[in-house]
Amino acid sequence: MGAGAVIQNVEPANAERQRWLALAEKALAGASFEEKLVSHTDDNIRIEPLYDRSMAAEPMVRTNPTSPWIVSQRVDDPDIDRAKAQVLEDVAQGATGLSLVFEGAPNAFGYGLPRTAQALETVLDGVPLNRVQVRIDAHPWSRAVADWLVAFLSKRRSDPTKLNLSFGIDPAAIFAGTGRLRMSIEALQASMPQSLAHFFSMGVPGVLLEADGRVFHNAGATEGQELGIMLASAVSYLRMFEKARQPLVYAAPHIGFALSVDQDQFLSIAKVRALRRLWARAQEACSIPNSTANVHAETSFRMMTAMDCETNILRTAIAAFAAAAGGADSISILPHTIVHGLPAGFARRVARNAQLIMAHESHIDHVADPACGSGAVEALTEELCEVAWAELQKIEAEGGVLSSLQDGHIQARVHASATRRNAAYKAGARAIIGTTLYPLKSDRPVETLAAERRPAFTEGVAVCEPLFPVRIDQSIGAVS
């Protein structure tokens, strides 16, 4: 098939394009244009070799575009004294945010802070909360931790209106990531409005409910699936706010988002941008003014490798750059040794400094939405929106995100996507540097902290098939 035939009706022809097509035909020397120059994402979105500039594009910016994104460090050590020391070092060495990951959280990967008020108070003692964001990673006891945090702030006589807080309450991510809810779906939906009303009565600002896509990504979801599930969660939260008799125009800013970014730089940039566009579209459908999405991005766990784990430093740097260029409000880099155990100080420092270099040496934040107008990124952004919106509609037709999970619909689609992706790696159509391509003859020792992995959360009334994190190298049997 000729180049002209493949891309007809995609972009209007012009003289430059025709010259390029002629040169491409000559260089291909009869080879297939489709096979050589066109690729597809996991959502089957076509990636063309050439795009025209998007002249009508408008920039999409962070919630606070005049400041750099928040450099967020994970706090997930079960040893409270070590965790406290890590926090103080992180803040002293440039971190501007802390992600508190408690045991039982799907994103704890077997570790996590002890689930006690004392643990929370200990790790936050001495932290200048007026200049450090505190976010609670979604876990089964998020509502209790929210109360602990509010009590701690009251004890310290902190003015909550001057703080940047995220409480990370996300029933859908917990249900998917653990396969359990501590109460029935009906009881949860009945109790949430009262809990929300209680939260608003305390006058605490910040993100209360978070639509977290990382659980789905790390289990194998495509970019479009992850975005669609997140949007379905956010829409369910709007309904909860309505039942709590809270005006949606005031409630929407209390909904936040958390997603994964990986080593596919341009697709990850488009993914962050698509999330902002989708949230604006959802709010428009609800007839409320657009509230800029508050987006937390974390580097992908499923892309991390056990073999030659220093290559993870490069993967996470690319992913974090994509998150920053895409306009994430806060970013967390998983330390490169996390596959081998609880990361030690060196790995944590590398993760932190990678972001600091991007912010203070590369000045990535000095340009708002640098991908705006790029024909390729704008096309990816828009097509991701369409795929995600279709996923949202499927979930809504299945009774909403919790019902869809309970019936196994979301899990089936995520597993199917993971199977297709893994097949591509097994067939050699995709490669993992240092693992399936150019592996080391012998690996080096990896330093981690002494800590035992905790068993997964198994208590609950409502039950569904859990979506546990599975790395790609695990899935294809490419581990040392």
Image: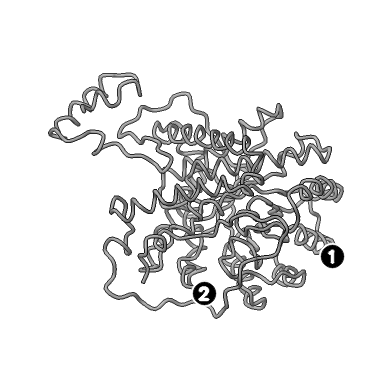
Amino acid bearing label 1: Lys
- For numbered disc 2, what is the local secondary structure? loop
Q: Nearer the viewer, residue 408 or 288?
A: 408
| Residue with the mark numbered 1 | 155
- The residue located at (58%, 37%) in the rendering is 392
In this view of the protein, can residue 132 be seen by the observer? no
**Marks 1/2: CA–CA distance:** 32 Å
Task: Indicate the position of residue 34 as horizontal and vertical percent values.
Answer: 26, 34
Q: Earlier in the sequence, mark 1 or mark 2?
A: 1
Query: In the rendering, which numbered label is found on residue 92?
Result: none
Query: In the rendering, which numbered label is found on residue 344?
Result: 2
Task: Indicate the position of residue 111 as horizontal and vertical percent values.
Answer: 59, 70
Amino acid bearing label 2: Ala
Please identify the quadrant where the N terminus is shown.
Answer: top left
Local packing at callout 2 (Cα closer than 10 Å; few below 14, some 14-19, many 20+) is some
Direction from residue 401 to residue 244 in the image, left or right: right
Q: Nearer the viewer, residue 315 or 46?
A: 46
Task: Indicate the position of residue 427 as horizontal and vertical percent values.
Answer: 29, 53
Q: Is 62 above or below relative to 152?
A: above
- The residue located at (64%, 77%) in the rendering is 79
Task: Indicate the position of residue 240 as horizontal and vertical percent values.
Answer: 76, 41
Extreme-front residue of the structure: 407
